[in-house]
Image (spheres, rainbow, N blue to C red):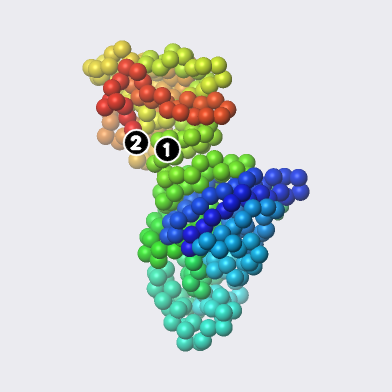
Amino acid sequence: MDIRLKNINKVFGNYKALDDVSFEIEKGKLIGLLGPSGSGKTTILRILAGLEYQDSGDVYLDGVLVNELSASRRGIGFVFQSYGLFPYMTVYDNIAYGLKVQKKSKDYIKNRVSELLELVELPGLEKRYPSQLSGGQMQRIAFARALAPNPQLLLLDEPFAAIDAKVRKELRSWLREMITKIGITSIFVTHDQDEAVEVADEIIITNKGRIEQIGTPIELYKNPRTPFVAQFIGQSTVIGEYRKLKGFETLEEGFRAVIRPEFIKVYKYGAQKEHFSVLEEGIVRNAVFRGDCTEVTIEVKGNLLKTIRALDDEGVEIGEKVQLLLSRCYVFDDEKAYSVTNKGLDEADTFYI
Ligand SMILES: Nc1ncnc2c1ncn2[C@@H]1O[C@H](COP(=O)(O)OP(=O)(O)OP(=O)(O)O)[C@@H](O)[C@H]1O
């Protein structure tokens, strides 16, 4: 199912929850709706599903205007953060629920339930109750239940939020594989960037009821188009002025710069033999081991820059003097954001992700 939202507005009391929201989603895509708390993500899902109605604007599903269509007639499956399973029903009855509402035959339901249990890799659990399942299993069953009536669109509202970190990671890749396999258009809400970047084909970034930017994870990283996106995506250090960082001009009044760890290379003092004119000096102020890398904070001309050192890189110690090459940064004011490259480096020397 392809989706189009056109100029959607929604006010709760005197709070504008959605402000002129428009976007289109191609059939079969897995979309992450990413934004801070209260930015309108859930409201968008609920309006799409017909669980909430917009004050103005249009919702089209497969080119058909569905503003007046009730939730049950939109062909949409919903998976909630809190699983939404009926606690007093077995796994079988939970999955069968929507099919019984559709008055499917007993044989059809039996086959469909076992087919779905195979799909979510939990065969044999028909007789269990939700209380007898782990969080990850409950979410898989909730997924099976949402898919049972063959919806054309699947909406997932923070589907992993209630699940602990390790299982959450597994479920993410599982969901990605599952959705690719079924080929169903899906939108999931999250406020976790890593989750959105890892799972989604495209990300829609919401902020204060508006869409900030839509793009693939890599597009959002490489070309943030608004100040909000420049700061929100990726791990960044925001500095008020360049303080004459080598290779960059002084910032204009009202502009700030975002520097990401991936734009910086850190060298042991004296190890770098090129680009002397733009090599900066800094002092290591903090180093935190993150499991797969070390996050190192370095003070450079009064700015604390976050950098990453791979496990194979030679270690640095707190208080150590190091050298850095800063390849580029994003510059933004209240209205626009753009990328600036270090003037002392050739294109081939700039570090892109
Ligand atoms: N039924 C309602 N009545 C009044 N205000 C509401 C209602 N539903 C949502 N809101 C308000 O609208 C705004 C957007 O809410 P929404 O749940 O869409 O945000 P969200 O981005 O999903 O947030 P979160 O990540 O915290 O779930 C919030 O300020 C919320 O308090």
Residue 140 visible at all: yes
**Residue corresponding to mark 2:** 353
- Number of residues whose C-alpha sits closer than 10 Å to that of mark 2, classed few (under 14), some (14–19) or many (20 or more): few
- Are the residues tagged 1 and 2 within 8 Å (C-beta)? yes
Mark closer to the chain start, 1 or 2? 1
What residue is at 76 percent from the left and 48 percent from the top? Answer: 13
Per the rendering, the mark at residue 221 is: 1
Looking at the image, is 7 positioned above or below residue 150? Answer: above
What is the quadrant of residue 29 in the picture? bottom left
Viewer-side residue, 76 vs 146: 76
Q: Quadrant of the C terminus?
A: top left
- Please name the residue shown 55% across and 16% down the image: 253
In the figure, residue 102 lies in which quadrant? bottom right
Residue 85 percent location from the top left of the image: 57, 69
**Disc 2 marks which amino acid?**
Ile
Q: Which of 68/13 is in front?
A: 68
Residue 27: give x, y in percent of width and height: 44, 59
Q: Is residue 350 left or right of residue 160?
A: left
Q: Amino acid at mark 1?
A: Tyr
